[in-house]
């Protein structure tokens, strides 16, 4: 059973200040940003998980030589998906209302690009991971710039300005690791002839546009 | 409106946002007014008496920000106070519950018993919260309650089930409160039984849905395998 986070408190006995301190509250806008981020990241990782599932379903039959590499990427996406599922439950963010649609759409995209062949599947990965990498970078920028808070003692006085809670540090670290892994997938896809897909430009740009639309929607609904 | 009433903002562990901001005069007056509700009801009279209790002049009222009028603010304050009571007691309440459903039932029953003191006047509160201009904030508060209840019960759903659970819980809860209005049994025994049967039905629906989904996936797989075996035979 999931339990809420422990309220974070720190004792500064070593530095001579004995008052217990805690982090100041997040503003409405900061919470709204985190709310949207967790929801869209969860939906995105769900999408990635189901795209690889669809591709694996097809490619494991047509191109058994690709099995280990597809499996590796898919397993990483499953881990990402589980991580964000846990975060969504723990931080009590509502999941995307359109989750059933994301499941069907992502599986369909995976199966379709898988059927088009290895190059198309890799081009799909390239397009998706390009958008996701950019999306995670945008998020990291905001998390780094907009989330310093004050450390307040029990009397309500500010002890220290511009610190970041472990909770947010952890979130940033998670997003960073995931972004790096997504960009690894991007590299793998390019190494495996993503550029050989025909029509390359049409395929990747369509998928990129779809992903951006899905991100916009999942943030809101 | 649905999306708005589900606007559960990120809940942080390191940065805690309280359900009720307790240190304003307005909240103190509303809290004092709640103690008058058992006698004078959800009326402006209770607020006036509270001002008197705190030796504030009646003129202070004009400085309050009652966004939906004084009575609705008093009702909302009752609802939020009850949510805070859940927040403070949920661990003890679900002690000994076998599963999520058992925990949820205990929590809902605990919440319903929180209406006991104000029940003779609770119809006034219900009449206020269903006024068209108040519906949006009442629904928001109702869904905040069902979200809290599900969370304390240990709900970990992360797809459409999240919405289904909370909506059905909200509906069951509203029905139970309406039932409670006319309940004359000792310790609201009938209401507690009523809500148990309601939640049991919700639980059964969820199980049925899961079973059908599992069966569907199984049938699909067997169909694919059947096709494959026929293809191999040629």
Image: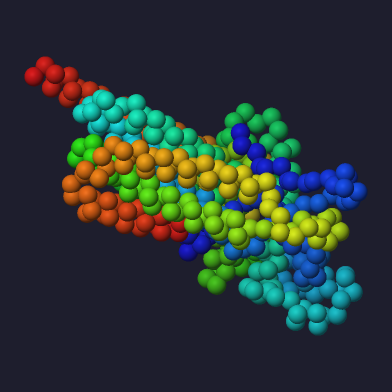
In the figure, A31 relative to B127: above or below? above
Q: Residue at x 52, y 50 (%)?
A: A38
Q: Residue at x 67, y 42 (%)?
A: A5
Front residue of this view, candidates B27 and B108:
B27
The x, y position of residue A170, in whole percent, is: 62, 44
Q: Is residue A96 visible?
A: no
User: With B94 as the anchor, is A72 left or right in this view?
Assistant: left
Q: Is residue A58 visible?
A: yes
Q: Residue at x 25, y 31 (%)?
A: A59
Front residue of this view, candidates B121 and A26:
A26
Residue at far front of view: A191
In the figure, A153 relative to B190: above or below? below
Q: Residue at x 11, y 16 (%)?
A: B233
Front residue of this view, candidates A135 and B200:
A135
Count of marks placed on residues: 0
The x, y position of residue A210, in whole percent, is: 31, 54
In the figure, A96 relative to B120: above or below? above
The x, y position of residue A108, in whole percent, is: 27, 42
Q: Looking at the figure, which quarter contains the N terminus of chain A?
A: top right
The x, y position of residue B47, in whole percent, is: 77, 72
Q: Looking at the figure, which quarter contains the C terminus of chain A?
A: bottom left
Colouring: rainbow
User: With B33 as the anchor, is A47 left or right in this view?
Assistant: left
> Residue B205 sits in which quadrant?
top left
Residue at far left of view: B234
Front residue of this view, candidates B83 and A122:
A122
């Amino acid at each position: 059973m999931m339990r809420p986070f422990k309220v974070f408190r720190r004792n500064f006995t070593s530095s001579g200040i004995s008052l217990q301190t805690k982090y100041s509250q997040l503003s409405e806008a900061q919470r709204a940003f985190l709310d949207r981020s967790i929801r869209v990241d969860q939906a995105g990782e769900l999408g990635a998980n189901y795209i690889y599932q669809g591709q694996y379903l097809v490619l494991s039959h047509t191109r058994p030589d690709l099995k280990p590499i597809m499996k590796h990427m898919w397993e990483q996406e499953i881990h990402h998906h589980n991580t964000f599922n846990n975060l969504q439950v723990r931080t009590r963010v509502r999941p995307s209302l359109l989750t059933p649609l994301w499941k069907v759409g992502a599986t369909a995209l995976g199966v379709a690009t898988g059927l088009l062949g290895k190059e198309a599947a890799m081009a799909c990965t390239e397009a998706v991971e390009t958008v996701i990498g950019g999306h995670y970078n945008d998020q990291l920028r905001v998390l780094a710039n907009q989330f310093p808070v004050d450390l307040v003692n029990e009397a309500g006085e500010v002890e220290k300005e511009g610190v970041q809670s472990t909770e947010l540090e952890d979130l940033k670290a998670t997003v960073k690791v995931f972004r790096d892994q997504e960009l690894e997938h991007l590299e793998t896809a390019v190494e495996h002839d993503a550029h050989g897909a025909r029509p390359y430009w049409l395929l990747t740009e369509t998928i990129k546009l779809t992903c951006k639309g899905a991100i916009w929607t999942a943030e809101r609904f | 409106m649905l999306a708005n009433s589900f606007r559960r903002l990120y809940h942080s562990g390191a940065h805690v946002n309280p359900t009720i901001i307790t240190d304003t005069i307005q909240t103190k007056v509303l809290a004092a007014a709640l103690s008058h509700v058992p006698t004078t009801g959800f009326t402006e009279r209770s607020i006036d008496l509270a001002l008197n209790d705190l030796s504030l002049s009646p003129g202070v009222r004009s400085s309050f920000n009652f966004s939906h009028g004084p009575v609705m603010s008093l009702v909302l304050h009752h609802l939020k106070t009850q949510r805070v009571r859940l927040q403070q007691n949920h661990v003890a309440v679900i002690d000994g519950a076998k599963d999520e459903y058992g925990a949820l039932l205990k929590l809902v029953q605990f919440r319903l018993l929180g209406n006991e003191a104000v029940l003779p006047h609770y119809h006034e509160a219900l009449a206020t919260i269903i006024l068209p201009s108040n519906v949006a904030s009442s629904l928001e508060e109702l869904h905040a309650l069902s979200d809290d209840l599900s969370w304390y019960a240990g709900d970990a759903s992360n797809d459409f089930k999240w919405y289904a659970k909370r909506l059905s819980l909200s509906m069951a809860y509203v029905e139970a409160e309406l039932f409670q209005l006319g309940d004359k049994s000792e310790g609201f025994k009938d209401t507690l039984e009523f809500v148990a049967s309601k939640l049991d039905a919700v639980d059964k629906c969820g199980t049925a849905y899961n079973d059908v989904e599992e069966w569907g996936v199984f049938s699909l797989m067997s169909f694919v395998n059947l096709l494959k075996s026929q293809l191999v035979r040629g």
